[in-house]
Amino acid sequence: MNETLIYTDSRPRAKSTGHAFGFEGNLGVPVIISSMLSVLLLTWLLHGENGMPLLAKFLLALFPTVLTTAYIVLMRSRRPPRFDLDLFASWVNGRSFQPARIQPRHPFVPNRNR
């Protein structure tokens, strides 16, 4: 190999995850989809014959976008991979890598303290 040649990677975009709307990678896509759903919901609410006030219609239509954005900001953006799934699993199953403080006894094992 020639030592005088300068090696330059010809595919720098393949290494970059990119950014959209301040989110890394493809995390901007759910925000776009939820905002489209909010526009569709607002259209249905504005053209429907319901007695809701105008502010309530806007707040109800904004709900999917706010929930999606909050989930991405709190659980996905600038977090390690699978952070949200691991957090939910630890909430459901408890701590995985530490023994329980009180170990349960099998009901058929005789108690020695009696």
Image: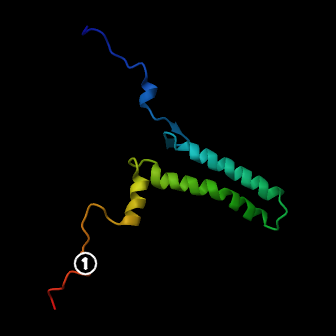
Pointer 1: residues within 10 angstroms few (<14), some, or many (20+)? few
The reply, left or right, for residue 54 in relation to residue 69 is right
Q: How is the image coloured?
A: rainbow
Q: Position of residue 69 (x, y in %)?
A: 56, 52
Report how many numbered discs are placed on residues in the image: 1
**Residue at the image position 33 percent from the left and 15 percent from the top:** 7
Q: Residue furthest left?
A: 112
**Residue at the image position 50 percent from the left and 52 percent from the top:** 73
Circle 1 — which element? Answer: loop
Q: Is residue 1 above or below residue 72?
A: above
Q: Position of residue 20 (x, y in %)?
A: 54, 39
Q: Is residue 107 above or below residue 80?
A: below
- Indicate the quadrant where residue 52 lies: bottom right
The reply, left or right, for residue 48 in relation to residue 3 is right
Q: Residue furthest right?
A: 49
The reply, left or right, for residue 80 in relation to residue 3 is right
Q: Which residue is mark 1?
A: 106
- Indicate the quadrant where residue 14 lies: top left
Q: Position of residue 3 (x, y in %)?
A: 24, 10
Of the 4 image quadrants, the one containing the C terminus is bottom left
Of the 4 image quadrants, the one containing the N terminus is top left
The reply, left or right, for residue 74 in relation to residue 29 is left
Q: Residue furthest bottom?
A: 114
In the rendered structure, which amino acid carries the disc numbered 1?
A: His
**Residue at the image position 49 percent from the left and 39 percent from the top:** 25
Q: Position of residue 107 (x, y in %)?
A: 26, 81
**Residue at the image position 18 percent from the left and 85 percent from the top:** 111
